């Protein structure tokens, strides 16, 4: 590889990396400015070699949204996960991997407006 090709490769790779980095950071900022917590129900899954893709459904203001996320497995169809969404743009979402949904939370009885803070069963 010539020196010019190597420099071009580094510049292209660096530009792509920066674009993905700032897109992700921008998404998180948009969600955090108007965050609401909802629960999503796992509808189906696709087991891959090293991970699983989960397909979920969540509701906000009486509208249904679909999403997917990748994790290392251990979740089952029908189980719930907490999701942080933007109140302004509910299609922007982030799964809260380290927050488990208590048994007292029911998908069909969750408030249409979501929660401003993570709910608990107290």
Image (tube, rainbow, N blue to C red):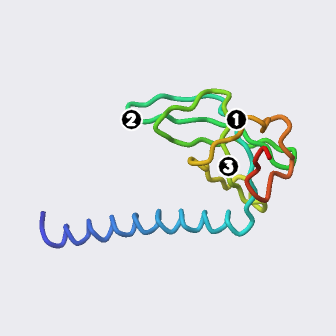
Separation of marks 2 and 1 at Cα, in angstroms: 22 Å
Residue 53 picture location, percent across and down: 52, 36
Residue 85 picture location, percent across and down: 71, 55
Reply above or below: 94 against 41. Answer: below
Which sits earlier in the primary sequence, circle 2 or circle 1? 1
Residue 54 picture location, percent across and down: 57, 35
In contact (CB < 8 Å): disc 2 and disc 3: no
Separation of marks 3 and 1 at Cα, in angstroms: 10 Å
In which image quadrant can residue 55 be found? top right
The residue located at (81%, 51%) in the rendering is: 114
Which sits earlier in the primary sequence, circle 3 or circle 1? 1
Separation of marks 2 and 3 at Cα, in angstroms: 23 Å
- Residue 103's label in the rendered image is none
State the residue in front, 33 or 105.
Answer: 105
Reply above or below: 33 against 117. Answer: below
State the residue in front, 57 or 72.
Answer: 72
Left or right of 25 on screen, residue 118: right
Give the residue number, with chain letter if any, for mark 1.
Answer: 41
The residue located at (78%, 62%) in the rendering is: 88
Q: Residues within 10 Å of mark 1 (few under 14, many from 20)?
A: many
- Toward the front, the furthest residue is 122
- Residue 83's label in the rendered image is 3
The residue located at (34%, 68%) in the rendering is: 14
Give the residue number, with chain letter if any, for mark 2.
Answer: 50
Residue 71 picture location, percent across and down: 49, 40
Left or right of 27 on screen, residue 119: right
């Amino acid at each position: 590889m010539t020196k010019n090709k190597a420099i071009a490769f580094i510049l292209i790779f660096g530009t792509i990396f920066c674009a993905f980095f700032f897109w992700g950071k921008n998404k998180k900022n948009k969600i955090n400015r108007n965050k609401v917590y909802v629960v999503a129900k796992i509808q189906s899954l696709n087991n891959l070699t090293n991970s699983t893709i989960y397909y979920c459904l969540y509701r906000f203001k009486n509208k249904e949204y679909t999403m997917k996320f990748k994790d290392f497995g251990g979740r089952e169809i029908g189980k719930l996960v907490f999701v942080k969404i933007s109140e302004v743009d509910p299609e922007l979402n982030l799964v809260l991997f380290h927050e488990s949904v208590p048994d007292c939370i029911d998908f069909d009885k969750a408030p249409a407006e979501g929660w401003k803070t993570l709910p608990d069963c107290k």
